[in-house]
Amino acid sequence: MKLLYIACMSLMFFAAPSFAVAEPVPGERPAALTSLPEVCRRFNDLNSRIRDGRTVKKSARAEFRRLLADVRDEYNRSGGGDYQRSDWVFPLSGHDVRAVGRGKRHGFMPRGYDFFSGNRHGGHPSYDIFIRDRNQDSLDDRSGKPVRVISMTGGIVVALEKDWEQGSGLRGGKYIWIYDPANELLVYYAHNGELSVELGEIVKPGDVLASVGRSGLNAAKKRSPTHLHLTVLNVREGRAEPLEVYRDLVRARTVAAQ
């Protein structure tokens, strides 16, 4: 009986089905890291750490380049469109280039700017685009309605901040970063009111992103006219260099007010 028991157990062992663990394909990223929302969440986390000075610049640069490559791959897999500069839309509804700040180079002063310095960066590599709002209620004086912030380019929402509150030292306030894979650009829309997009959302030129607001350390102060703060960075090969786009704003298609 003992020998029969051993024989039966041996037969069951060799007859049992085997469950092999799949070996990872060389060069293939784990499935958990390949979804579009996940890579955007990771980029947003990196952006927040850079913003708040909670990372080392050298490692942040390497992570920045790697994550943008991941976002670009997932954007293409998700059917994101390639829009060229000829498709760009002026970023405020009911406005055109006449709303851009005047003066030398229309306020574009990139010297001293370093994306990886976060909230403490220098320079003003940007354009301030003003609305008619004398009483500073974030509404257009003539229509009494909010002014929509429009996506200038195509791309995907890779970082944002919805929770700014009065008294915060965050300079951008409620902001949005759009990554445009077709042109290798990061486009920054700051000082918004309410945001209309979510992290990981794919947008095309002309889509509504937010309403113009007065959020941000300096933008909320009485001395500051209500405006959109627009920055465009060239991020080819992992760089983050300010790009002068005033001529593109001149040529951009305009969108009617509400």
Image (cartoon, rainbow, N blue to C red):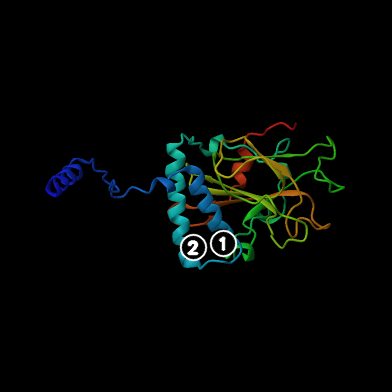
Q: Is residue 234 among the parts visible in the rendering?
A: no
- The Cα–Cα distance between marks 2 and 1, rounded to whole angstroms, is 9 Å
Front-lying residue, 173 or 206 = 173
Instruction: Name the residue type under label 2.
Output: Ala
- Seen at 75% across and 59% down, the residue is 218
Mark 2, residues whose alpha carbon is within 10 Å: few (<14), some, or many (≥20)? some
Judge left or right: residue 95 versus residue 242.
Answer: right
Which residue does the numbered mark 2 point to in the structure image? 60
- On the image, the x and y values in percent for residue 64 come to 48, 57
Q: In this view, does 127 lie above or below 151?
A: below
Q: Which residue lies furthest to the front in this view?
A: 1
Q: Do the residues labelled 2 and 1 touch (CB within 8 Å)?
A: yes
Which residue does the numbered mark 1 point to in the structure image? 49
Determine the image quadrant of residue 15.
top left
Q: What element carries label 2?
A: helix
Determine the image quadrant of residue 77.
top left
- On the image, the x and y values in percent for residue 66 come to 43, 54
